[in-house]
Amino acid sequence: MMDPSTMHATQRISVALIDDHEVIHAGIAVWLRQADGYIGLVGCYVSIEDYLREHPPGSHGVDVVVVDLELSSRHLDFDHLDALVGVGPRIVVFSHIETDEIILRCLDLGAASYVAKSEGRNHLANAIVAARSDVPYVAPRMAGAMVRDRRVGRPSLPPREREVLIAWFQADSKELVADKLRIAPSTVATHLQRVRAKYAAVGRPAKTKAALVARALQDGIINVDDL
């Protein structure tokens, strides 16, 4: 798999930031300007509601949204995060909260990645590039939460589904998986749909590639070194 830290997007990545602290706005703006010009901050917002008013479902112009989980109300706003995921852009949660349960909940809701603020600039930039390219990126705190998660409800995946799933984690597209395994892209898609359906059936839905990576890590299908 391509290392996100060495990736340069073929076109500029448009990023919106949601955080209720202006110092975070200023700091991330500086960080992103240092990312070789391929990440651009196109808007800063103090709440998810403000962002959604300006970017309703179906709107364009934002590739990735970086959002703090605990905004001005000082409570964890999972409902608005769920609404934000449904709008369309990939979501990277950037929060000072490092609790396993909170990280896993965000992935369950459909966040592409979770980066703790203590993990800093490089992990955030890597997560943004990976999210835009639909490549899994697992920062250290996120990896720890996924490895320690032992929730019940593991679906039974036959060897072929496991093979396709692992190959997809290690590739940039379903077409590359198809070439590697010598099967049709539609067959790859069918296997992945079945895996997602099985996880949904046991109450552990995986709406994004990152969430499916989390499930595979939790269930011992892969380990962090495989990514």
Image: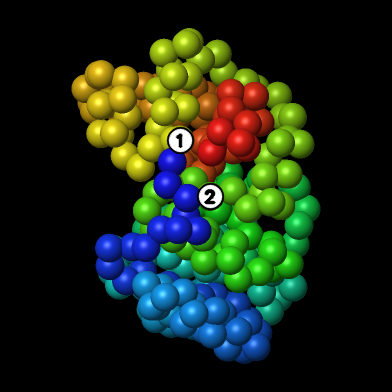
Direction from residue 10 to residue 91 in the image, left or right:
right
Secondary structure of the residue carrying tag 1 is helix
Residue at horizontal 37%, vertical 53%?
133
Q: Which mark is residue 169?
A: 1
Image quadrant where residue 20 sits: bottom right
Pick the front one: 199 or 188: 188
Sequence-wise, the earlier of marks 1 and 2 is 2
Amino acid type at circle 2 is Tyr
Instruction: Farthest residue to the top: give it.
Output: 158
Indicate whether 77 appears above or below 149: below
Does residue 21 show up? yes
Q: Residue at label 2?
A: 137
Vertical comparison of 44 with 134: above or below: below
* Badge 2 element: loop
Expressed as whole percent of the image width and height from the top left, the position of residue 28 reads 56, 80
Q: Nearer the viewer, residue 159 or 151?
A: 159
User: Are there few (<14), some (14-19), or many (20+) residues within 10 Å of tag 2?
Assistant: many
Q: Is residue 109 left or right of residue 51?
A: right
Residues at marks 1 and 2, CA–CA distance in whole angstroms? 10 Å
Residue 36 % position (x, y): 42, 75
Q: Quadrant of the C terminus?
A: top right
Three-letter residue code for mark 1: Phe
Which residue is more in the foreground, 13 or 171? 171
| x 72%, y 29%: residue | 151
Q: Is residue 167 above or below residue 99?
A: above
Q: Is residue 190 visible?
A: no
Give me the disc on residue 75: none
Q: Position of residue 213 (x, y in %)?
A: 54, 37
Identify the residue shown where x is 66% and y is 74%: 71
